Image: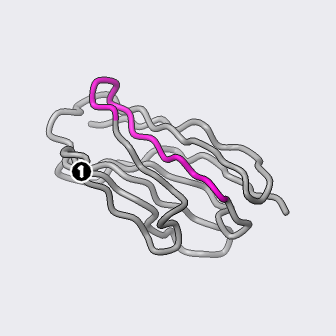
Amino acid sequence: QVQLVESGGGLVQVGGSLRLSCAASGSIRSINFMGWSRQAPGKQREFVASITTAGSPIYADSVKGRFTISRDSAKNTVYLQMSSLKPEDTAVYYCYADRLRTYWGQGTQVTVSS
């Protein structure tokens, strides 16, 4: 089992920045990759970014150039630095980890106010 705990969400104005953190614990060996998805009200959950154990990132087109995903293996933590935030970035952000199956965190709310 893998446990994931997100933090760092909140309310920010348009153009502002936030950094989300996701701490992994439990059976963290052999985690293939970790990442973030988000779900806005009334919409399906969508991919935001992921990062492999080697540190290779992948981003959704909607966040390229604005979001940066990184990973601190020593702390078993993955981060999502979000900049130039837009109202359409408002959503619950979920951390996930892939190890034989996908594990999800409980989510953290990000609200971008105009």
Q: Amino acid at mark 1?
A: Thr
User: Which residue shows up at 28% across the image and 24% down it?
Assistant: 74
User: Which residue shows up at 68% across the image and 70% down it?
Assistant: 88
Read off the residue under disc 1.
52
| Residue 75 position in % (x across, y down) | 34, 24
Nearer to the camera, 60 or 31? 60
User: Which residue shows up at 77% across the image and 59% down it?
Assistant: 14
Q: Please identify the quarter of the rendering in which residue 73 is found.
A: top left
> For the magenta stretch, what is the residue range?
72-84
Residue 102 higher or lower than 20, as above or below? below
| Residue 50 position in % (x across, y down) | 35, 56
Residue 50 higher or lower than 108, as above or below? below
Residue 77 belongs to magenta span:
yes
Residue 38 higher or lower than 53, as above or below? below
Q: SS at mark 1? A: strand
Residue 74 belongs to magenta span:
yes
